[in-house]
């Protein structure tokens, strides 16, 4: 089974995370199928970059996001979708 989860990056006491698609039972920092985003909680406000089209694709294929990733998608995914529709409307 596939999972969309955080993969820790960064240095000691300065974490940043990649949001990746990987096998559910694999190691936290092991090999992954695709990098679908980035999360840096040390900045104020936290920096979050999500590729919602790819996240949606993998969720349709059966990938399950972890609780933290689900929260990030709900909080920041809606903001990016709102920005895309606003920028798309202004370009028309």
Image: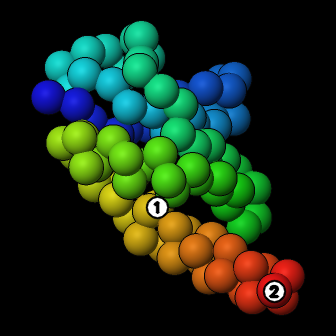
* 33 relative to 37 in the view: left or right: left
| Percent position of residue 59, x then y | 28, 49
Q: Quadrant of residue 70?
A: bottom left
What colour scheme has been applied to the protein in the rendered image?
rainbow
Q: Which residue is mark 2?
A: 92
> Closer to the camera: disc 2 or disc 1?
2
Where is residue 63? Give x, y as percent. Answer: 24, 40
Q: Are marks 2 and 1 in contact (CB under 8 Å)?
A: no
Residue at x 14%, y 28% (from the top left corner): 1
Observer able to see residue 41: no
Crowd band around label 2 with a 10 angstrom C-alpha radius: few (<14), some (14–19), many (20+):
few
Q: Nearer the viewer, residue 15 or 72?
A: 72
In the drawing, does residue 18 fall left or right of residue 86? Answer: left
Which residue in the protein does label 1 denote?
72
Residue at 61 percent across and 26 percent down: it is 9
Q: Residues within 10 Å of mark 1 (few under 14, many from 20)?
A: some
Q: Report the side of 26 relative to 30 (left or right).
A: left
Decide: is 66 above or below 87: above
Taking depth in this image into account, of 41 and 2 the one nearest to the observer is 2
- Label 2 element class: loop
Front-lying residue, 52 or 91: 91
Q: Earlier in the sequence, mark 2 or mark 1?
A: 1
Q: Residue 15 at x, y = what percent?
A: 63, 35
Tell me, yes or no, if residue 60 can be seen here. yes
- Residue lying at the far top of the rendered structure: 31
Q: Which mark is residue 83?
A: none
């Amino acid at each position: 089974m596939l999972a969309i989860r955080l993969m820790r990056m960064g240095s000691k006491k300065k974490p940043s995370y990649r949001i990746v698609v990987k096998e559910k039972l694999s190691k936290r920092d092991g090999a992954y199928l695709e990098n679908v985003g980035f999360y840096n909680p040390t900045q104020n406000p936290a920096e979050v970059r999500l590729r919602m089209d790819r996240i949606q694709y993998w969720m349709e294929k059966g990938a399950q996001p972890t609780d933290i990733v689900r929260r990030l998608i709900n909080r920041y995914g809606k903001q990016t979708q709102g920005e895309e529709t606003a920028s798309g409307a202004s370009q028309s």
